[in-house]
Image (cartoon, grey):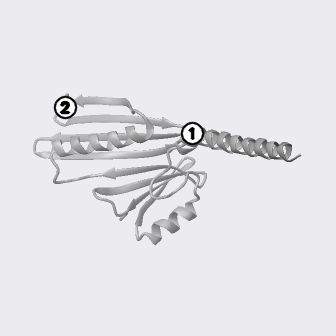
Amino acid sequence: MRPNSYRGIKNRAGNVRFFWAASVALLISVLPAWAVDDIPPPFGFHWNDSMTKVEQVLLGAKAKIVTKIRKEKREVWTVEGLVQPGLKRTLFTFKEGFLVEVELQYEYPDWSIERYNDRMGEIRRYFDAKFGTGKLVSRSRDTDSDVIQTLVGYQWIVGGTMLELFYFSAQRDLMVFRSITVTYKAI
């Protein structure tokens, strides 16, 4: 009787090991899909955070809401004072009171065109590594007027979200304006 009961225990132990191994394999195969279902907004926010929650976090971070503009069914806040190198301002867009877009506008007044190009490349490679290869959505240079304008943009779509990276330059004689914009959107 002892050999039969030992065999039953051994079979049950084998079944338990198989169940756990199969469960772990299933979990590992599903985790990458969960990890990049959506591109989250920056600063630890979540899509559909309420205006009240966003305002509390911004005030706690000592950021200043400079303007609140209502456009149709959306409200756009311009925020300054979020601490990040080169971050000039951030636009938070709410639809029906909930967060749907965050636009980060970076300006580096002392940077050369080469330094901007390097930074664009760094940011693009970071997003490519994280979300897959971005799609080139804009590459233009307008020299038809006395203001030379350049626009280069990339886009990543993951789940129900979109991320856009744009470089913009406008130059007239010795006056130059350049910016890098990163926009997170719930679509």
Residue type at mark 2 is Ser
**Which of pointers 2 and 1 lies earlier in the amino acid sequence?**
1
Callout 2 touching callout 1 (CB < 8 Å) = no
From the top left corner, tell me how far across and down residue 142 is, in percent.
23, 30
Q: Quadrant of the N terminus?
A: top right
Q: How many numbered badges does the structure rendering display?
A: 2
Residue type at mark 1 is Ala
**156 left or right, relative to 56:** left
Q: Quadrant of the C terminus?
A: top right
- Kindly report which numbered mark, 2 or 1, lies closer to the viewer in this rendering: 1
Q: Residues within 10 Å of mark 1 (few under 14, many from 20)?
A: few
Look at the numbered disc 1 and give the secondary structure of its residue. helix
Please name the residue that numbered disc 2 is placed on.
Answer: 145
Q: Nearer the viewer, residue 163 or 26?
A: 26
Q: Residues within 10 Å of mark 2 (few under 14, many from 20)?
A: few
Q: Quadrant of residue 165?
A: top left
**Residue appearing at x 38%, y 46% in the figure:** 182
From the top left corner, tell me how far across and down residue 95 is, in percent.
57, 49
Q: Quadrant of residue 85?
A: bottom left
From the top left corner, tell me how far across and down residue 84 is, in percent.
33, 60
**Residue appearing at x 10%, y 41% in the figure:** 173
Outermost residue on the right side: it is 1
Q: Nearer the viewer, residue 92 or 11?
A: 11
Please name the residue that numbered disc 1 is placed on.
Answer: 33
**Residue appearing at x 52%, y 68% in the figure:** 56
Look at the numbered disc 2 and give the secondary structure of its residue. loop
Residues under labels 2 and 1: Cα distance? 48 Å
